[in-house]
Amino acid sequence: MNFFPSKVESQLSTLSIHDLILRFSSLVKTSEDSSEQQFIFQGSWNNEGFTISQILKKANKYTPVIAGEITVIEDGLLINVRFSLSRMAKRRLLIFTIVALALTAFFILGYNSWLYGIITFGIAMVNYILAREHFDAQANKSRHALKRLFSAE
């Protein structure tokens, strides 16, 4: 089990690899792209895979980074996708968890204060649960946008 929130799934697309690359170029903004076109994602891609994240109007640290592998099959494309937190969000979650658990140990072992220890442990758990829930909500939004990218419409 992974400590950090993540999701892995596979999607089938009836697009050809050429059509998918055209979709990527019209919906995914790269670092070299300076046009005023409206993009849904930002990131990079090639024929084997991609790393993108959704462009949002309002910043959200739980917006997932979407990494995928593209495999050509006889009916179209098999796309294995992994949604994960950004490195900065992982660092924040890890640091806060370590500090909260250290305070829990400090109160319980150092001062024999079980009440404060339970409170700090509870705060750590609430923070982790909220982080996972926010990530799941943002991953669902990104999944819907990703379906638009992979659909043949």
Image (cartoon, rainbow, N blue to C red):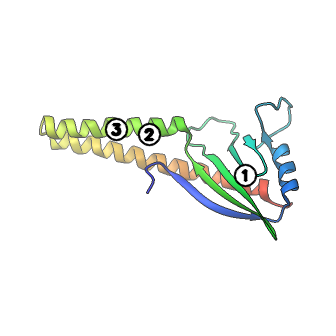
Q: CB of mark 3 within 8 Å of CB of mark 1?
A: no
Q: Position of residue 89 (x, y in %)?
A: 51, 38
At numbered mark 2, what does the secondary structure look like: helix, strand or loop? Answer: helix
Q: CA distance from mark 3 to mark 1?
A: 34 Å
Return the residue nearer the eye: 42 or 139.
42
Residue that mark 3 sits on: 98
Residue that mark 1 sits on: 145
Q: Is 130 on the left or on the right of 150, as rendered? A: left
Q: Position of residue 128 (x, y in %)?
A: 41, 46
Q: Is 24 on the left or on the right of 58, as rendered? A: right
Vertical order, 128 against 153 (above or below): above
Residue 22 in view, yes or no:
yes
At numbered mark 3, what does the secondary structure look like: helix, strand or loop? Answer: helix
Residue 41 in view, yes or no:
no
Q: Is 90 on the left or on the right of 30, as rendered? A: left
The residue most toward the left is 112
The tag earlier along the polypeptide, 1 or 2, is: 2
Amino acid type, label 2: Leu
> Callout 1: 10 Å neighbours few (<14), some, many (20+)?
some
